[in-house]
């Protein structure tokens, strides 16, 4: 059985009366690029080996990303639904 690790982080949002609050998280992204080298057993459009430029974008390893706390006024409907 593999090792399981957990990490935690606390984020507080100060919310005034008649407001709503939430937290948004967006991972920091990294971009990597290079070339694919593809080998075919038979000629493909006259060539056995093809090279293709490649770029990929994904989350940075071990990055917590950007965390933003937000608040906004509640609508009358939200007050009726959530404030009893």
Image (cartoon, grey):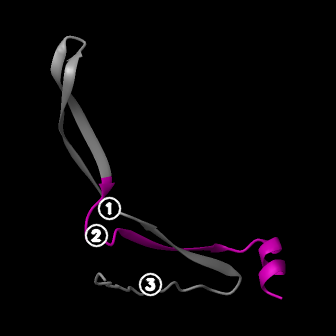
Q: Quadrant of the N terminus?
A: bottom left
Numbered circles on residues, count: 3
Image height of 57 relative to 65, above or below: above
Name the spot of residue 17 as percent of width and height, x first: 68, 87
Image height of 44 relative to 76, above or below: above
Are the residues at dot 2 and dot 1 in contact (C-beta closer than 8 Å)? yes
Name the spot of residue 60 as percent of width and height, x first: 27, 62
The residue positioned farthest toward the top in the image shown = 46
Q: Quarter of the image holding residue 16?
A: bottom right
Range drawn in magenta? 58-84
What residue is shown at x 56% (from left), y 75% (from top)?
22
Q: Residues within 10 Å of mark 2 (few under 14, many from 20)?
A: few
Instruction: Please name whichever residue, 49 or 80, is drawn nearer the observer in this view of the structure.
Output: 49
To which residue does mark 3 refer? 11
What residue is shown at x 72% (from left), y 74% (from top)?
74
Image height of 33 relative to 80, above or below: above
- Asked if residue 78 is among those painted magenta in the image, a careful observer would answer yes
To which residue does mark 1 refer? 28
| SS label for mark 1 | loop
């Amino acid at each position: 059985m593999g090792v399981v690790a957990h990490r935690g982080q606390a984020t507080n949002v100060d919310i005034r009366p008649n407001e709503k609050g939430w937290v948004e998280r967006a991972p920091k992204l990294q971009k990597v690029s290079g070339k694919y080298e593809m080998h075919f057993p038979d000629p493909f459009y006259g060539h056995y080996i093809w090279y293709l430029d490649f770029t990929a974008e994904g989350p940075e390893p071990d990055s917590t990303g950007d965390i933003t706390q937000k608040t906004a006024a509640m609508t009358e409907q939200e007050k009726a639904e959530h404030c009893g």
